[in-house]
Protein backbone atom coordinates (compact mmCIF):
# COMPACT_ATOMS: atom_id res chain seq x y z
CA UNK A 1 0.00 0.00 0.00
CA UNK A 2 1.14 3.55 -0.73
CA UNK A 3 2.84 4.97 2.40
CA UNK A 4 0.77 8.17 2.22
CA UNK A 5 -2.53 6.39 1.51
CA UNK A 6 -2.04 4.32 4.64
CA UNK A 7 -2.70 7.49 6.64
CA UNK A 8 -5.66 8.60 4.51
CA UNK A 9 -3.63 11.08 2.41
CA UNK A 10 -4.06 11.05 -1.37
CA UNK A 11 -0.79 11.31 -3.20
CA UNK A 12 -0.95 14.44 -5.38
CA UNK A 13 -1.21 13.81 -9.10
CA UNK A 14 0.24 17.16 -10.06
CA UNK A 15 2.02 20.19 -8.62
CA UNK A 16 1.27 23.60 -10.10
CA UNK A 17 -0.26 21.85 -13.09
CA UNK A 18 2.74 19.62 -13.79
CA UNK A 19 2.02 15.86 -13.61
CA UNK A 20 4.01 13.78 -11.15
CA UNK A 21 5.89 10.68 -12.20
CA UNK A 22 4.75 7.31 -10.88
CA UNK A 23 7.97 7.19 -8.89
CA UNK A 24 8.09 10.66 -7.30
CA UNK A 25 11.32 12.58 -7.55
CA UNK A 26 13.00 13.12 -4.19
CA UNK A 27 15.08 16.12 -3.24
CA UNK A 28 17.38 15.44 -0.32
CA UNK A 29 16.53 13.49 2.78
CA UNK A 30 12.80 13.02 3.43
CA UNK A 31 11.64 15.46 0.76
CA UNK A 32 8.89 14.59 -1.74
CA UNK A 33 8.68 17.48 -4.20
CA UNK A 34 8.90 19.82 -1.23
CA UNK A 35 6.23 17.96 0.78
CA UNK A 36 7.19 16.58 4.15
CA UNK A 37 7.04 12.81 4.58
CA UNK A 38 3.73 12.03 6.32
CA UNK A 39 5.01 9.04 8.25
CA UNK A 40 7.63 10.93 10.28
CA UNK A 41 5.13 13.72 10.90
CA UNK A 42 2.41 11.41 12.18
CA UNK A 43 4.87 9.43 14.29
CA UNK A 44 5.89 12.66 16.05
CA UNK A 45 2.24 13.65 16.44
CA UNK A 46 1.32 10.32 18.03
CA UNK A 47 4.20 10.60 20.50
CA UNK A 48 3.17 14.17 21.41
CA UNK A 49 -0.45 13.07 21.92
CA UNK A 50 0.69 10.28 24.23
CA UNK A 51 2.74 12.71 26.31
CA UNK A 52 -0.13 15.20 26.42
CA UNK A 53 -2.53 12.57 27.71
CA UNK A 54 -0.01 11.47 30.32
CA UNK A 55 1.04 14.90 31.58
CA UNK A 56 -1.90 17.15 30.82
CA UNK A 57 -1.77 20.21 28.59
CA UNK A 58 -0.28 22.73 31.05
CA UNK A 59 2.45 20.41 32.32
CA UNK A 60 3.28 19.34 28.77
CA UNK A 61 3.70 22.93 27.60
CA UNK A 62 5.84 23.78 30.61
CA UNK A 63 8.05 20.73 30.09
CA UNK A 64 8.51 21.15 26.35
CA UNK A 65 9.20 24.90 26.41
CA UNK A 66 11.69 24.52 29.26
CA UNK A 67 13.49 21.72 27.45
CA UNK A 68 13.73 23.70 24.22
CA UNK A 69 14.97 26.80 26.07
CA UNK A 70 17.70 24.65 27.62
CA UNK A 71 18.69 22.54 24.62
CA UNK A 72 18.07 24.91 21.70
CA UNK A 73 17.95 28.52 22.94
CA UNK A 74 16.67 31.01 20.40
CA UNK A 75 18.98 33.79 19.25
CA UNK A 76 18.77 37.04 17.31
CA UNK A 77 21.06 36.80 14.32
CA UNK A 78 22.81 39.93 13.01
CA UNK A 79 21.91 41.10 9.51
CA UNK A 80 23.89 42.43 6.60
CA UNK A 81 22.95 43.88 3.19
CA UNK A 82 24.41 42.06 0.19
CA UNK A 83 24.00 43.07 -3.45
CA UNK A 84 25.08 40.66 -6.18
CA UNK A 85 27.46 41.68 -8.95
CA UNK A 86 24.50 42.27 -11.28
CA UNK A 87 23.02 44.80 -8.85
CA UNK A 88 20.27 42.63 -7.34
CA UNK A 89 19.39 42.47 -3.66
CA UNK A 90 16.76 39.79 -4.21
CA UNK A 91 18.76 36.61 -3.73
CA UNK A 92 16.89 33.39 -4.46
CA UNK A 93 13.86 31.43 -3.23
CA UNK A 94 13.28 27.68 -3.07
CA UNK A 95 10.51 25.40 -1.82
CA UNK A 96 11.96 22.58 0.27
CA UNK A 97 11.77 20.85 3.63
CA UNK A 98 14.03 22.29 6.34
CA UNK A 99 15.28 20.60 9.50
CA UNK A 100 13.35 21.94 12.49
CA UNK A 101 16.43 21.91 14.81
CA UNK A 102 18.09 24.27 12.30
CA UNK A 103 15.47 26.98 13.00
CA UNK A 104 17.36 29.11 15.52
CA UNK A 105 15.58 32.48 15.32
CA UNK A 106 11.84 33.17 15.50
CA UNK A 107 10.76 36.80 15.24
CA UNK A 108 13.50 38.15 17.54
CA UNK A 109 12.03 36.22 20.47
CA UNK A 110 14.40 34.70 23.03
CA UNK A 111 11.90 32.38 24.74
CA UNK A 112 10.27 29.27 23.32
CA UNK A 113 6.52 29.35 23.82
CA UNK A 114 6.13 33.11 23.65
CA UNK A 115 5.13 35.28 20.68
CA UNK A 116 3.81 38.82 20.71
CA UNK A 117 0.39 37.89 19.31
CA UNK A 118 -2.15 35.06 18.92
CA UNK A 119 -0.87 32.98 21.81
CA UNK A 120 -4.11 30.97 21.71
CA UNK A 121 -2.86 29.28 18.53
CA UNK A 122 -0.57 27.03 20.58
CA UNK A 123 -3.56 25.63 22.52
CA UNK A 124 -5.49 25.15 19.28
CA UNK A 125 -2.65 23.11 17.81
CA UNK A 126 -2.58 20.89 20.88
CA UNK A 127 -6.35 20.41 20.63
CA UNK A 128 -5.90 19.37 17.00
CA UNK A 129 -3.35 16.66 17.77
CA UNK A 130 -5.50 15.32 20.60
CA UNK A 131 -8.50 15.26 18.27
CA UNK A 132 -6.48 13.24 15.74
CA UNK A 133 -5.48 10.78 18.46
CA UNK A 134 -9.09 10.40 19.59
CA UNK A 135 -10.64 10.04 16.13
CA UNK A 136 -7.77 8.46 14.23
CA UNK A 137 -7.97 11.23 11.61
CA UNK A 138 -4.23 11.59 11.30
CA UNK A 139 -4.39 12.19 7.57
CA UNK A 140 -6.49 15.32 7.99
CA UNK A 141 -4.22 16.51 10.77
CA UNK A 142 -1.09 16.00 8.66
CA UNK A 143 -2.54 17.99 5.76
CA UNK A 144 -2.70 21.05 8.00
CA UNK A 145 1.10 21.16 8.00
CA UNK A 146 1.59 21.30 4.23
CA UNK A 147 1.68 25.10 3.86
CA UNK A 148 5.31 26.29 3.90
CA UNK A 149 6.77 28.52 6.59
CA UNK A 150 8.83 31.47 5.35
CA UNK A 151 12.51 31.28 6.38
CA UNK A 152 15.75 33.12 5.72
CA UNK A 153 18.85 30.94 5.40
CA UNK A 154 22.27 31.67 6.84
CA UNK A 155 24.84 29.52 5.00
CA UNK A 156 28.27 28.10 5.70
CA UNK A 157 30.20 25.42 3.83
CA UNK A 158 27.10 23.89 2.23
CA UNK A 159 24.93 23.84 5.39
CA UNK A 160 22.30 26.25 6.72
CA UNK A 161 20.51 27.61 9.78
CA UNK A 162 17.19 29.44 9.52
CA UNK A 163 15.35 32.51 10.79
CA UNK A 164 11.59 33.11 10.74
CA UNK A 165 10.13 36.60 11.07
CA UNK A 166 6.96 36.34 9.02
CA UNK A 167 4.51 33.58 8.18
CA UNK A 168 5.01 30.38 10.17
CA UNK A 169 6.18 31.57 13.58
CA UNK A 170 3.57 29.62 15.58
CA UNK A 171 3.96 26.52 13.42
CA UNK A 172 7.73 26.58 13.81
CA UNK A 173 7.49 26.73 17.60
CA UNK A 174 4.91 23.97 17.77
CA UNK A 175 6.82 21.82 15.27
CA UNK A 176 9.77 21.96 17.67
CA UNK A 177 7.51 21.21 20.64
CA UNK A 178 5.96 18.23 18.84
CA UNK A 179 9.41 16.97 17.83
CA UNK A 180 8.94 17.20 14.07
CA UNK A 181 12.15 16.42 12.16
CA UNK A 182 11.29 18.76 9.26
CA UNK A 183 8.86 21.42 8.04
CA UNK A 184 7.88 22.46 4.50
CA UNK A 185 9.39 25.89 3.87
CA UNK A 186 9.92 28.63 1.35
CA UNK A 187 13.59 29.43 1.82
CA UNK A 188 15.07 32.81 0.97
CA UNK A 189 18.82 32.98 0.40
CA UNK A 190 20.55 36.33 0.14
CA UNK A 191 23.14 36.90 -2.59
CA UNK A 192 26.34 34.95 -1.93
CA UNK A 193 29.64 36.58 -0.97
CA UNK A 194 31.22 36.35 -4.41
CA UNK A 195 33.75 38.54 -6.18
CA UNK A 196 32.05 41.65 -7.52
CA UNK A 197 29.20 41.63 -5.02
CA UNK A 198 28.95 44.43 -2.48
CA UNK A 199 28.13 44.24 1.21
CA UNK A 200 27.09 46.79 3.82
CA UNK A 201 27.28 46.16 7.55
CA UNK A 202 25.58 48.10 10.35
CA UNK A 203 26.31 46.06 13.45
CA UNK A 204 27.24 46.91 17.01
CA UNK A 205 30.88 46.12 17.63
CA UNK A 206 32.07 46.76 14.07
CA UNK A 207 34.90 49.26 14.39
CA UNK A 208 37.35 51.00 12.14
CA UNK A 209 40.30 48.82 13.16
CA UNK A 210 38.59 45.65 11.96
CA UNK A 211 37.46 47.39 8.76
CA UNK A 212 41.04 48.42 8.02
CA UNK A 213 42.24 44.87 8.70
CA UNK A 214 39.72 43.37 6.25
CA UNK A 215 40.85 45.83 3.58
CA UNK A 216 44.54 45.22 4.30
CA UNK A 217 43.99 41.46 4.04
CA UNK A 218 42.67 41.94 0.52
CA UNK A 219 39.21 40.53 1.19
CA UNK A 220 37.25 43.68 0.39
CA UNK A 221 37.63 47.17 -1.01
CA UNK A 222 35.92 48.75 1.97
CA UNK A 223 34.61 52.22 2.64
CA UNK A 224 32.02 54.04 4.73
CA UNK A 225 28.67 54.46 2.94
CA UNK A 226 25.22 55.83 3.75
CA UNK A 227 24.22 52.27 4.73
CA UNK A 228 27.16 51.67 7.06
CA UNK A 229 30.58 50.24 6.34
CA UNK A 230 31.00 48.07 3.25
CA UNK A 231 32.36 47.78 -0.23
CA UNK A 232 33.11 45.46 -3.12
CA UNK A 233 34.03 41.86 -2.25
CA UNK A 234 37.40 40.78 -3.69
CA UNK A 235 37.54 37.14 -2.54
CA UNK A 236 34.83 34.48 -2.74
CA UNK A 237 33.57 33.27 0.66
CA UNK A 238 31.09 30.50 1.43
CA UNK A 239 30.34 31.65 4.97
CA UNK A 240 27.62 34.31 4.97
CA UNK A 241 28.83 36.14 8.10
CA UNK A 242 32.50 36.39 7.07
CA UNK A 243 32.52 40.22 7.07
CA UNK A 244 30.37 40.72 10.19
CA UNK A 245 31.54 42.39 13.38
CA UNK A 246 33.87 40.02 15.28
CA UNK A 247 31.38 39.62 18.15
CA UNK A 248 28.66 38.74 15.64
CA UNK A 249 30.99 36.27 13.93
CA UNK A 250 31.54 34.47 17.24
CA UNK A 251 27.81 34.41 18.06
CA UNK A 252 26.75 32.93 14.72
CA UNK A 253 29.63 30.45 14.71
CA UNK A 254 28.57 29.11 18.11
CA UNK A 255 24.95 28.71 16.98
CA UNK A 256 25.99 27.10 13.72
CA UNK A 257 28.26 24.63 15.48
CA UNK A 258 25.43 23.66 17.83
CA UNK A 259 23.22 22.76 14.86
CA UNK A 260 25.95 21.37 12.59
CA UNK A 261 28.80 20.14 14.82
CA UNK A 262 30.45 18.36 11.87
CA UNK A 263 31.01 21.53 9.82
CA UNK A 264 34.66 22.62 10.08
CA UNK A 265 34.36 26.35 10.73
CA UNK A 266 37.65 28.25 11.18
CA UNK A 267 38.56 27.92 14.88
CA UNK A 268 39.33 31.65 15.14
CA UNK A 269 35.65 32.40 14.46
CA UNK A 270 34.64 31.45 18.00
CA UNK A 271 36.74 34.19 19.65
CA UNK A 272 36.46 37.84 18.53
CA UNK A 273 40.11 38.70 19.25
CA UNK A 274 41.35 35.64 17.37
CA UNK A 275 39.09 36.49 14.44
CA UNK A 276 40.50 40.02 14.24
CA UNK A 277 43.97 38.53 14.51
CA UNK A 278 43.30 36.34 11.48
CA UNK A 279 43.32 39.49 9.34
CA UNK A 280 45.85 41.64 11.19
CA UNK A 281 47.80 39.51 13.69
CA UNK A 282 50.31 42.26 14.48
CA UNK A 283 47.64 44.74 15.56
CA UNK A 284 45.31 42.37 17.35
CA UNK A 285 47.65 39.85 18.99
CA UNK A 286 47.37 39.87 22.78
CA UNK A 287 50.15 40.66 25.21
CA UNK A 288 52.69 37.89 25.27
CA UNK A 289 51.15 36.26 22.23
CA UNK A 290 53.94 34.97 20.05
CA UNK A 291 51.81 33.60 17.22
CA UNK A 292 53.55 34.26 13.91
CA UNK A 293 51.83 36.35 11.26
CA UNK A 294 50.36 34.34 8.37
CA UNK A 295 52.93 33.53 5.73
CA UNK A 296 52.92 35.54 2.51
CA UNK A 297 52.04 32.40 0.52
CA UNK A 298 49.00 31.83 2.74
CA UNK A 299 47.75 35.36 2.03
CA UNK A 300 48.23 34.91 -1.70
CA UNK A 301 46.39 31.59 -1.71
CA UNK A 302 43.47 33.17 0.18
CA UNK A 303 43.19 35.86 -2.48
CA UNK A 304 43.02 33.50 -5.45
CA UNK A 305 41.06 30.54 -4.03
Image (tube, helix red, strand yellow):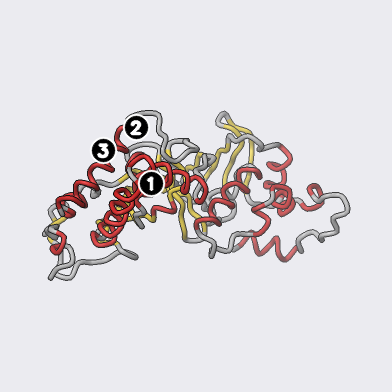
Q: Is residue 117 above or below residue 85?
A: above
**Which of the two labelled residues, at mark 3 and mark 2, occupies the earlier sequence position?**
2
Q: Is residue 190 left or right of residue 252?
A: left
Where does the N terminus fall, quadrant-wise?
Answer: bottom left
- Between the C-alphas of marks 1 and 3, the distance is 29 Å
Q: Is residue 185 left or right of residue 104?
A: left
Q: Residue at x 54, y 51 (%)?
A: 255
**Which of the two labelled residues, at mark 1 and mark 3, occupies the earlier sequence position?**
3
- Please name the residue that numbered disc 3 is placed on: 124
* Disc ID at residue 173: none
Q: Position of residue 121 (x, y in %)?
A: 29, 35
**Which of the two labelled residues, at mark 2 and mark 1, occupies the earlier sequence position?**
2
Q: Position of residue 144 (x, y in %)?
A: 21, 46
Check disc 3 and report its element: helix, strand or loop: helix
Where does the C terminus fall, quadrant-wise?
Answer: bottom right
* Disc ID at residue 119: 2
Locate residue 221: give its quadrant: top right
Q: Residue at x 57, y 45 (%)?
A: 232
Q: Is residue 107 above or below residue 52?
A: above
* Disc ID at residue 188: 1
Q: Residue at x 69, y 51 (%)?
A: 271
Check disc 2 and report its element: helix, strand or loop: loop
Q: Position of residue 75 (x, y in %)?
A: 52, 42
Amino acid sequence: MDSLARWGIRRPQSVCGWPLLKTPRTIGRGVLLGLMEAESLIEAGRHAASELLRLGRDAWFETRWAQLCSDRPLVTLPRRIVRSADGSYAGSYARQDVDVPAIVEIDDERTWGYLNNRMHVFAEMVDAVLHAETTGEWGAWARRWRDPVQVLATRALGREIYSISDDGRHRAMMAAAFGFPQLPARVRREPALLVGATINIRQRGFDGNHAEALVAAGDIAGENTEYGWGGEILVNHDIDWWFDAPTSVALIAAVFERVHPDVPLPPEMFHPDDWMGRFDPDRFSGAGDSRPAPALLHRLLRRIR
